[in-house]
Image (spheres, rainbow, N blue to C red):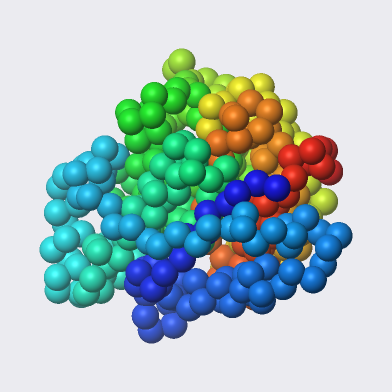
Amino acid sequence: MCKVAVMYGKELAMYGFADAHPFGSDRLDAFWSMFKAQILNNNSNKNDSSYSNLNSIVIERPVMIDERILLEFHEREYVEFVKKASQFGIGYLDYGDTPAYKGVFEAACYVVGSTVRALDMVLTRSVDHAFNPIGGLHHARRGSAGGFCVFNDIGVAVMLARKVYGLKRIAYVDIDAHHGDGIYYEFEDDPLLFIADIHEDGRYLYPGTGFEYEDGKGEAKGTKLNIPLRPYSTSRDFMDALKRVERFVEDARPELIIMQCGADGITGDPLTHLCYDSNIHYHATRVLHRIAHEYCDGRMIALGGGGYNRDNLAKAWVNVVRALLADTESNGHE
C-alpha cells in the first residue's frame, strides 16, 4: 500500500472563473464529494486494496507559492501583469479564454504552491505519491496565460525538481484532451524532459498543436512523443496509444514522473470530442505507477488538469488516487 497525499482546501477553490465559465470553482467540490464517498468514508470493500488502509491517505492543505519561485519559470513582466490584473479584476489575461478577476493572482499562486508542496512531499519521502486536483495548468507559457491557465505549475515543478533536488531526467505524461503546449514548447529543446502527450488532434481542438511530427528540437529530438487522436476516438484507441507511452517512458528511465490527468477526453465533456470512459485514468495511472516504482524509487506526482463534466472528472480523479494507492506487487501490466 502506497502513501498518497491529496491536496485539498478552500484556497484551491479560489481558482475558478465565474459566469458559467467551464473552469468553475465547483470542479474541486465535485471531486471531493466523490472522493469522500468512495474512499474516505468507504472502507467496506476488502477486496480492493485502495480501500483497505485510510492511514495511507494524507490530506494536505494548499500552500501559496513565493513569488520569487514563480520566476524560476515565468517572466517577471508577466507575473507583474497578473498581479495588476488581479487588483482590478477586469479584462482577460489572454485573448479571451482566461478572464481576470479580483484575487486571481493569489488563487493561481495557491495552485502552483500546492503542486510544489506535492513535489516536495514526494521527493523528501514524506509520502510515496501526491495528487493536486486543480494542478496541471499546462497551457500557460513563460510570458502569457492561455486556455484557463494563469501560471504553469508543471513548469515550475520541473525547474525546482532540478534546481533544488538535483534531478535531471524527468518524464511528463499528459492525457488531457488538449495538447499541453505550455510545457511542450517551453521545453521543446530540453533533452532531459521526456514528454508524452495523448490528446485530440490539434486540427479539431484548441490549442491547435501537438502533431506527431513534433518530437523535439536539436539535442532533444526524439525526447518528445505527441499522439494526436481523431475526434470520437474511444478507450481502445487510448489504450493503444498508452502502450506507446509506456515504452517511451520506460526507455527514458526517468528519476521523476509528473502526470497530468485531464478528464476532458471522457464521453460527454462539453468542450471536446473524445469518447473515453473514466477507467482509462485508472489504467494510465497504474502503468505510470509501476514505472515509477521500477525506475524512479516511486517518485510520482499527479495533477488534475482539464475536465468540464463534473461527474466525469470526479470519477476519473478518484480512479487516479485509487491507482496511486495500490500495492506495487500487484501493479504489473494491465
Toward the viewer: 195 or 301? 301
Q: Is residue 29 visible?
A: yes
Residue 56 relative to residue 88: left or right: right
Identity of the residue furthest to the bottom in this view: 19
Residue 109 relative to residue 5: left or right: left
309 vs 163: above or below:
below
264 vs 170: above or below:
below
Q: Quadrant of the C terminus?
A: top right
Residue at position x 22%, y 50% from top?
66
Residue at position x 24%, y 63% from top?
105
Give the quadrant of residue 108.
Answer: bottom left
Q: Is residue 230 visible?
A: no
Q: Position of residue 157 (x, y in %)?
A: 39, 41
Give the quadrant of residue 97.
Answer: bottom left
Q: Position of residue 89 (x, y in %)?
A: 20, 74
Residue at position x 50%, y 24% from top?
169
Identity of the residue furthest to the top in this view: 219
Residue at position x 45%, y 49% from top?
118
Toward the viewer: 253 or 17? 253
